[in-house]
Every structure is written in C-alpha cells, then in structure tokens.
Image (spheres, rainbow, N blue to C red):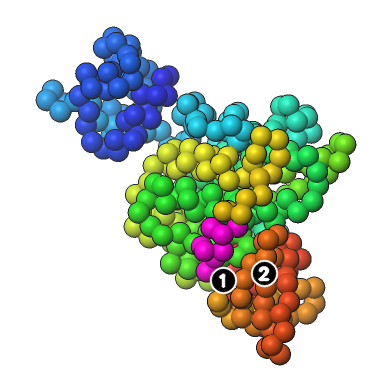
C-alpha cells in the first residue's frame, strides 16, 4: 500500500482529482499510480472513477493505519515509530511495557487503539469510546531528570490537542484546567500524563490522549451528556487519520526538545489564553478540604491560583487537587 496516495485522497475529502494531476503531484508514473489505487482497493478503500472528473475517495477503512500515520510525518521524536491496534486494555499500559524495554526502543513511540477495555482518565475514571469513534493514543518520552514533567506536559499536550483540532476543523477549542479539551464548554478530549523514575535520575513519561470524534450522544452516560461531546456532535466533519497525524505533529512541536521535555514560555501563554477556568468561581478539593474562590491565573508549573473568599491567594497543583464544582464530569 502506498500511503502517500491514500493521504492525497483524504486531503481532498470527497472531491475528485484527475489521475494525471495526482500522479504529477506525487511524482508517480501513470502505471505506478494505477497500481497504488489497485492496492488501496485491495486494502478496503473504496475509490470511484469518473471518466471526466477523475478519482474520488468514497470510503476508507474504519481503522487507523500505521502506514498512513507515519508517512512523511513532520516530527523529530514523537511519532518516529507508530503502532496501531484494534483493541487493548489501555494504550498507557502498552506504553509502559515499551518503556521497560529501554529508551532506544520506546522514546517517541506512539500507540493507537480503536478500543480500550480498561481505558482510564484522571483520578481513576474510565474513558468511554466505542470502537472506531475516537482517537485513543499514548506516546512515550524520556526526560533527563524527574521533576515537574507531569504538570508541564499536561499543559503542553492540552495545547497540542487543541491546536490539532483547530488545524482540521473550523472551531475554537479551549482548555479546562488541568486536562480537559473543550468546545463550547463541553469536553471533547482529555489528557493523562504518567511519570516514573528511570535509571540514572532520568524519567520516563507516558502521555495518554483521548479525543472524541464520531460518538453520538447515546455513547455517553445520561448524566454526562450535557458536559461532553464529540466533534461530530458539534457539527465538525473530520478525517480521523488526518487529525491523528496533526496531533502527533503538534505534540512533537510543543512537548519535546531534542533530549527532554520542552518548557516554553509561549506554550505557557497559549495555555493560559485557552484556559476557560481562569476567571471562574469554583470549588476545589485538596485532600479533605474544599476551597472556594475565583481562579485568577495559572503559575509556571501549571498550578492553579485561586483568590479565596477571604481575599488571600493560594496555589493548587494539578496532581494534588481537583475541581469539584464549576465543571462537568471528569470522564470521556
């Protein structure tokens, strides 16, 4: 299968393209292009041929394909190796299995699954997504030291996911602190970052990301429906393969430098600009204590700064606290 050809069809959506134009754009001979289209048909792509207008992609296979996701991807680390599975317990679990095999085999690895039997969200919640309706992925990064990577990468991954969605659809995407990606205040995605110490003071990091793409309202529990949505539910038409590629490219740009985790002031500003929690009155739990007040800012480590009812200010870390009112359920 020639993924450059399938991606060219996907990028044109359902618009036909003359074979001569497509062959010239991909620097293929007419015979090579015809063979590539035949191979795509054998792989489950339905391509319609019109004698005047050319070829048009009618339908693609329902699953994400590693060949398409990795093809000429504009990345330095994340996405250098891509694995796609139909079903697994959790992509984060598979990522940690890869980490155990060492940095050389796991750094930059991206794992996608069509369905997770034990997908998890923040604070032990479950991620809900029928097969072929979402992007469920985990990526592995190694950092030279163990520190505040979880907060930094939660922020960066949320920005990357928001930017990836906006790159593919004409919708404004925000962030609900600390790990939700939202459209019109409804959750369309979530981030779960796990960090573990590794040899010689280094840290291994797994970034789990779920994006709701094709789900219908019935896919979510009734009490969650006012607070969650898929891109399809808010009127967006998106190719899941192109969105997954954009996600990998944006993650690579905002999350990692050549060796470790990127800490970028521009990403901090972008997260603060997108954060719809800033300016709201919320109730927040830290341990057994509930605090109430107005969110005034995010700190450099992605902690939330709350102006309390007595006028004082207090910082709350993303890993040690959570909002208990002022947002919807923390699940897929």
Location of residue 282 (image quadrant): bottom right
Provide the secondary structure element on which disc 2 rests.
Answer: strand
Residue 91 visible here: no
Q: Which mark is residue 277?
A: 1
Quadrant where the image shows the N terminus: top left
Rounded to the nearest whole Å, what is the CA distance between mark 2 and mark 1?
Answer: 9 Å
Judging depth in this view, the residue of 295 and 258 nearest the camera is 258
Can residue 44 be found in the magenta stretch?
no
Location of residue 89 (image quadrant): top right
- Residue that numbered label 2 is attached to: 304
User: Majority secondary structure of the magenta segment?
Assistant: helix
Residue 90 placed where, x, y %?
66, 44
Q: Which stretch appears magenta?
A: 268-277
Q: How many marks?
A: 2
Which of marks 1 and 2 precedes in the sequence?
A: 1
Can residue 276 be found in the magenta stretch?
yes
Quadrant where the image shows the C terminus: bottom right
Residue 96 placed where, x, y %?
74, 39
Residue 149 to residue 252: above or below? below
In the image: residue 304, left or right of residue 196: left
Q: Residue at x 32, y 30 (%)?
A: 9
Residue 242 placed where, x, y %?
42, 39
Residue 91 to residue 70: above or below? below
Provide the secondary structure element on which disc 1 rests.
Answer: loop
Q: Residue at x 78, y 79 (%)?
A: 289
Q: Residue at x 68, y 53 (%)?
A: 152
Q: Residue at x 67, y 69 (%)?
A: 304
């Amino acid at each position: 299968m020639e993924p450059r050809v399938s991606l060219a069809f996907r990028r044109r959506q359902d618009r036909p393209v003359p074979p001569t134009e497509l062959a010239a754009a991909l620097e293929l001979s007419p015979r090579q292009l015809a063979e590539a289209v035949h191979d795509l048909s054998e792989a489950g792509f339905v391509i319609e041929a019109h004698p005047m207008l050319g070829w048009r992609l009618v339908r693609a296979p329902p699953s994400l394909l590693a060949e398409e996701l990795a093809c000429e991807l504009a990345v330095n680390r994340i996405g250098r190796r891509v694995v796609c599975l139909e079903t697994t317990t959790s992509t984060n679990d598979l990522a940690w299995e890869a980490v155990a095999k060492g940095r050389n085999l796991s750094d930059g690895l991206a794992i996608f699954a069509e369905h997770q039997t034990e997908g998890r969200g923040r604070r032990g919640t479950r991620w809900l997504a029928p097969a072929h309706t979402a992007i469920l992925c985990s990526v592995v990064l190694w950092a030279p030291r163990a520190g505040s990577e979880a907060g930094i990468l939660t922020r960066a991954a949320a920005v990357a996911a928001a930017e990836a969605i906006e790159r593919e659809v004409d919708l404004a995407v925000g962030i609900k602190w600390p790990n939700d990606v939202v459209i019109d205040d409804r959750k369309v995605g979530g981030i779960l970052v796990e960090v573990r110490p590794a040899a010689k003071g280094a840290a291994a990091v797994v970034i789990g990301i779920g994006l709701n793409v094709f789900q219908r309202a019935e896919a979510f529990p009734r009490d969650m429906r006012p607070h969650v949505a898929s891109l399809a539910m808010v009127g967006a038409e998106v190719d899941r393969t192109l969105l997954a590629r954009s996600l990998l490219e944006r993650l690579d740009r905002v999350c990692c430098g050549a060796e470790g985790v990127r800490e970028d002031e521009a990403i901090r500003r972008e997260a603060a600009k997108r954060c719809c929690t800033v300016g709201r009155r919320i109730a927040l739990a830290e341990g057994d204590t509930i605090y109430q007040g107005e969110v005034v800012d995010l700190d450099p480590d992605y902690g939330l700064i709350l102006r309390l009812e007595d006028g004082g200010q207090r910082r709350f870390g993303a890993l040690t606290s959570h909002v208990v009112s002022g947002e919807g359920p923390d699940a897929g």
